[in-house]
Image (tube, grey):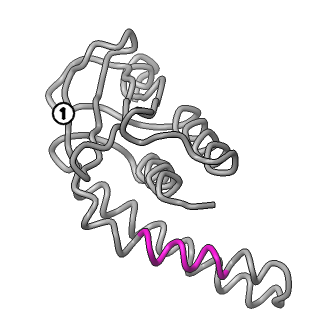
Amino acid sequence: MTSEAKERCRLVAVTLDEASIGRGNPDQEHERAIAIYDIVEANYFALPNYDGGPYALHIALIEKKLCFDIRTPDGTTIVMHHLSLTPFRKAIRDYELICDSYYKAIRSASPAQIEAIDMGRRGLHNEAAELLMKRLEGKVLLDFDTARRIFTLIFALHWRG
């Protein structure tokens, strides 16, 4: 990929709609900020059949659907995609359970047990990223690592701290 294409096929900003998503407690806000930073720091993101970019992504919650408002860097909407959260419920619930197990294991489990739980955690994260890529197929082009980072943000939006 040329350096020009790398500059165009990426997110330069990710924002959350406070009116629909709301603000979280300080721990939640911290996790969201880290997830957003990670996405913006390294990503591949483009729209099929659109010779534009870079992009800004504004995420809102509309009628229990995640709204991906894909914009130009100056804030002009290019396209909106609404994603039902229903297919992600199990992934979010399972990921939360295994993350809780992981954080508990860090305090008292053996290194082998921690590694096994962490492998399971990474596996669930990968499955959720694949689901996100499938749900966005034909709408948004993104690589696997970007899908993982966006799932991290989706999870952070649901995490209760």
Tell me the quarter of the image containing the C terminus.
Answer: bottom right
The image shows residue 54 at horizontal and vertical percentages of: 38, 20
How many numbered marks are there?
Answer: 1
Q: Count residues near mark 1 (Cα–Cα under 10 Å), then give few for <14, some for 14-19, many for 20+.
A: few
Considering every residue shown, the one lying at the far top of the view is: 74
Residue shown at 48% from the left, 67% from the top: 125
State yes or no: residue 31 in magenta.
no
Q: Is residue 96 magenta?
A: yes
Residue name at image x 29 percent, y 28 percent: 70
**Residue 130 horizontal side relative to residue 98, left or right:** left
| Front residue of 92 and 148 | 92
Q: In the figure, residue 80 lies in which quadrant?
A: top left
> Residue 112: x, y in percent?
77, 89
- The answer to whether residue 35 is above or below residue 87 is above
Task: Point out the stretch of residues depicted in magenta.
Answer: 92-101
Q: Secondary structure at mark 1?
A: loop
Q: Split into 4 quadrants, where in the image is the N terminus?
A: top left
Badge 1 is on which residue?
48
Q: Residue at x 30, y 21 (%)?
A: 71
Tell me what residue is drawn at x 46 percent, y 30 percent: 15
Q: Is residue 78 left or right of residue 122?
A: left
Q: Which sits in the foreground, 56 or 22?
A: 22
Amino acid type at mark 1: Pro
Please state the horizontal and vertical placement of residue 149, each as a whole percent of the image.
Answer: 50, 49
Locate residue 72 relative to residue 37 in the image: left or right. Answer: left
| Principal secondary structure, stretch drawn in magenta | helix
Above or below, comparing residue 105 to residue 40 in the picture: below
Give left or right: position of 80 versus 24. Answer: left
